[in-house]
């Protein structure tokens, strides 16, 4: 019975988040109010606040749900092919998966028209953190298994890695119209930069990647659980 109630609460939360995401993308953060979300979701305003305490938390939950789906896709790729745990492969997939999800795309490209004041709200910070991009735990596993450049420590990447990775997102509004690159082209260029900057001198053997894969997958599964709990508020 408890599982049934939890499932019902999660389904209700999804219905609310579906509406919140739709209004956010159509109207922007400023106009998407809790009153409007509740009305369109067919629930009372108080029901929304049973899940999330503030309006900012509702919209963080929208992003956290997308982040969970993104991480789940990353983990599925890693399970299918251990080579996907390499820094260049992982972050190129991160870029693709994030850019294909409208709310994450708006966040990482700093789309003020859509997100407005949410871009300056502390509620959005976990979605932009280095932990989501590449945690010390993940980088530590890579270093332990010789999957980073010789002598490179995880802490050495604290500045250059997000600068490069988020730079590929941030430059989107500044790209000239004549630049004819697909999303896949851009992801491949990101992978090339990361491989040349931080990867080992020679491609790692398959057995080394396979040995590290379970630890890497565990790190990302833990991260997915954290974002899932945040997305569903008190329903988790």
Image (spheres, rainbow, N blue to C red):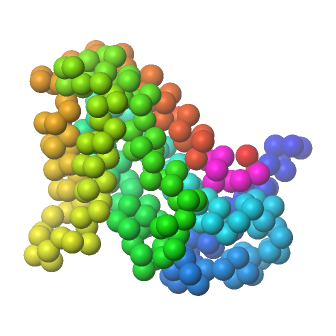
Q: Relative to residue 5, is residue 150 drawn left or right?
A: left
Q: Nearer the viewer, residue 235 or 3?
A: 235
Rendered-image quadrant of the N terminus: top right
Residue 90 placed where, x, y %?
32, 39
Q: How many marks?
A: 0
Residue 205 placed where, x, y %?
21, 18
Q: Is residue 40 visible?
A: no
Residue 170 placed where, x, y %?
29, 62
Q: Nearer the viewer, residue 129 or 146?
A: 129
Q: Does the magenta portion include 155? A: no
Residue 166 placed where, x, y %?
31, 54
Q: Which quadrant would residue 175 be assigned to in this image?
A: bottom left
Most extreme residue toward the right, as rendered?
Answer: 1
When the figure is inspected, residue 188 is found, relative to residue 52, above or below; the finding is: above
When the figure is inspected, residue 183 is found, relative to residue 152, above or below; the finding is: below
Q: Is residue 58 visible?
A: yes
Residue at x-position 21% and y-position 72%: 174
Residue at x-position 49% and y-position 43%: 72
When the figure is inspected, residue 65 is found, relative to residue 103, above or below; the finding is: above
Q: Relative to residue 85, is residue 62 drawn left or right?
A: right
Q: Is the magenta region chiefly helix, strand or loop? A: helix
When the figure is inspected, residue 41 is found, relative to residue 206, above or below; the finding is: below
Q: Which quadrant would residue 48 be assigned to in this image?
A: bottom right
Q: Relative to residue 102, is residue 166 drawn left or right?
A: left
Residue at x-position 38% and y-position 61%: 108
Q: Which residues are magenta?
A: 228-234
Q: Relative to residue 27, is residue 236 drawn left or right?
A: right
Residue at x-position 81% and y-position 43%: 3
């Amino acid at each position: 019975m408890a599982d049934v109630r939890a499932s019902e609460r999660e389904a209700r939360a999804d219905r609310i988040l579906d509406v919140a995401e739709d209004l956010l993308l159509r109207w922007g953060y400023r106009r998407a109010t809790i009153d409007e979300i509740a009305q369109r979701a067919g629930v009372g305003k108080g029901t929304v606040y049973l899940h999330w305490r503030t309006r900012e938390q509702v919209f963080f939950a929208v992003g956290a749900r997308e982040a969970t789906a993104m991480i789940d896709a990353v983990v599925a790729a890693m399970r299918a092919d251990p080579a996907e745990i390499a820094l260049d492969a992982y972050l190129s997939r991160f870029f693709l998966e994030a850019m294909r999800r409208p709310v994450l795309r708006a966040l990482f490209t700093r789309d003020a028209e859509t997100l407005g004041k949410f871009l300056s709200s502390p509620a959005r910070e976990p979605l932009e953190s280095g932990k989501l991009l590449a945690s010390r735990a993940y980088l530590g596993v890579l270093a332990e298994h010789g999957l980073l450049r010789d002598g490179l420590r995880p802490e050495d990447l604290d500045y250059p890695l997000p600068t490069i990775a988020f730079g590929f997102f941030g430059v989107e509004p500044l790209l000239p119209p004549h630049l004819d690159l697909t999303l896949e082209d851009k992801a491949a260029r990101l992978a090339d930069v990361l491989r040349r900057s931080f990867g080992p001198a020679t491609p790692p053997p398959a057995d080394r990647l396979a040995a590290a894969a379970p630890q890497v997958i565990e790190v990302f599964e833990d991260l997915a659980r954290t974002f899932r709990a945040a997305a569903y508020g008190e329903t988790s």
